[in-house]
Image: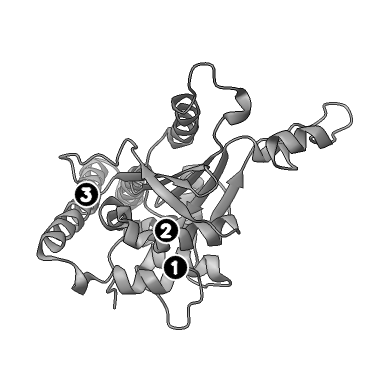
Amino acid sequence: MKNLIRFDWAIKRLLRNKANFGILEGLLSELLEEDIKIDHILESESNKQVADNKANRVDLLVQDSKGDLIIIEVQSDYMQNYLLRMLFGTSKLVIDNMDEGMPYRQVKKIISVNIVYFDLGQGEDYIYHGGTNFVGMNRKDILHLSRNEQLVYHTEKIAKIYPEYYIIKVNQFNDVAKNTLDEWINFLKTEEVKEGSKAKGLKEAKEKLNKLKLSPEEKRDYEQYIKNWRDEYGEIVGNYEKGKFEGREEGIGIGMEMGAANKQEFADEKVKQSKIEMALNCLKNGMSIEMIAKLTSLTEEEVRGIKK
């Protein structure tokens, strides 16, 4: 039974409290493979309370004990230009943290952590990491920092100077945790912490993100948040059922004017076209391929073919 609140709402409300930093520190430590300590939370676009409480996107901007800036963004709904949004977010942070006359060596290191619940890009993995490297056009070698540059930048790799991006495709996780980071991703997908989990911060998450321990005000806010999310999902399913019915009726109607041998074949084709149109709509709204296949009765292979 799911007894923990959704992570996107937790970021929106509970994880901004310094007393709960251990939860975020645990996730970041497992993902970045180093011991992360959050110094404080900074103002970001969605840190501000807004009237629209729909479950679409929330983000959090923190500064760690080394002075690095980390954006943590949760995106529930499909967003066509999301990869460019990631680029914009890191670029804006670099500029916003540059004072006039400030030397370039003081440019802030930016880490962008993106937790997405839709099928972003094409790839078989559920965790992706990207950065900047320079490759020789002739010799194909990687450009490295000189010894003096390493002392200036406090790192051995050029990629560590530039913004780094992490993408966690939650719906693509197969629910089998092979390591402590997988334990975190399982929680992001199922809102459950399995017995025996050893990942940093998960024990604290299980304790502090329990629905039963929310205040009455928090419970009302959370219930409204979930209602909005279900309404959006229900709208997608409703549109599918309507399209499926209309497609069947149109196919049969036109088939009546054709020969009896072709009637059923034509009607079936119209129904399939309706399923394909609905699958496209579901993909745009961030549904997983597995869920779309169940909803439309198409095979997962057929859904992947539509995406291509």
Do we see residue 6 in this rendering? yes
Q: Quadrant of residue 253?
A: top left
Q: Nearer the viewer, residue 64 or 1?
A: 64
Do we see residue 119 in this rendering? no
How many angstroms separate mark 2 from mark 3 (CA)?
28 Å
Q: Which residue is mark 2?
A: 24
The reply to whether the C-beta atoms of the residues labelled 1 and 2 are less than 8 Å apart is: yes
Q: Position of residue 256 (x, y in %)?
A: 22, 45
Q: Amino acid at mark 3?
A: Glu
The reply to whether the C-beta atoms of the residues labelled 2 and 3 are less than 8 Å apart is: no
Q: Nearer the viewer, residue 161 or 298?
A: 161
Q: Position of residue 124 (x, y in %)?
A: 58, 55
Give the mark nearer the N terminus: 1 vs 2: 2
Using a 10 Å C-alpha cutoff, classify the residue at mark 2 as few (fewer than 14 neighbours), some (14 to 19) or many (20 or more): many
Q: Which residue is mark 3?
A: 232
Residue furthest to the top in view is 101
Q: Amino acid at mark 2?
A: Leu
Q: Secondary structure at mark 3?
A: helix
Whether residue 157 sits left or right of residue 94 in the image: it is: right
Closer to the eye: label 2 or 3? 2
How many angstroms separate mark 1 from mark 2 (CA)?
7 Å
Q: Which mark is residue 201?
A: 1
How many angstroms separate mark 1 from mark 3 (CA)?
31 Å
Give the mark nearer the N terminus: 2 vs 3: 2
Q: Is residue 294 above or below residue 148?
A: below
Residue drawn at x 49%, y 63% as measured from the top left: 173
